[in-house]
Amino acid sequence: MILATDEQRNAPKRMWWDHMGRITMPTLLIGGGPSSPIPQEQIAAFADLLPDSRHITLDAGHLVHETRPKEFLAAVGEFLSPAARTPS
C-alpha cells in the first residue's frame, strides 16, 4: 500500500490537481519541513489550489504529530476553533 500511495503522491495524475479547487471545506495542511519525505513545495502548491486553506510548517519530518505533538495540537485546535473562522 505504501508504494501505491507514494506513487500517487510523487506523480499525481493531472486530473487530481485539476479538481482540487472543488474542495470547498476549510482545510489545514501541515508540512513537516525540510526533513519530511513529502516535498514541501508540493504541499504549498496544493494549498494554493484550495479556496479556503491554511498551510503551516512544523519542522518535524514526516510524523509531525509524534515529533512535535504540542505544536501539532495547538495548530489543529486553533484551526478548529470557532473564533478562527470568524471574519475580522
Image: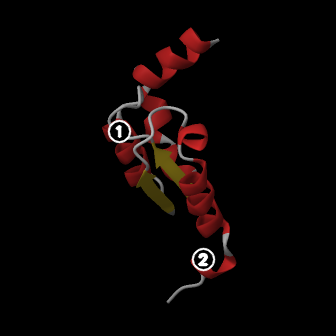
55 shown above or below 36: below
Amino acid on which the number 1 mark rests in the picture: Gln
Q: In the figure, 71 relative to 59: above or below?
A: below
Q: Is residue 71 above or below residue 19?
A: below
Q: Tell which of 54 and 50 is nearer to you.
A: 54
Q: Residue at x 47, y 31 (%)?
A: 15
Residue 85: mark in rendering: 2
Question: Residue 75 — which label?
Answer: none
**Circle 1 sits on which residue?**
40
Compute the Cα span from label 2 to label 1. Answer: 25 Å
For the point 49% across and 51% down, the residue is 21
Quarter that holds the N terminus = top right
71 lies left or right of 39 = right
Q: Position of residue 87 (x, y in %)?
A: 54, 85
Dot 2: element = helix
The crowd level at tag 2 (other Cα within 10 Å; few <14, some 14-19, many 20+) is few
Residue 37, can we see it?
Answer: yes
Residue 8's x, y, as percent? 50, 20
The residue positioned 44% from the left and 40% from the top of the image is: 32
Label 1 crowd (10 A; few <14 / some 14-19 / many >=20) = some
Front-lying residue, 83 or 8: 83
* Residue 51 placement (x, y as % from top left): 48, 61
Q: Visible in this render: residue 12? A: no
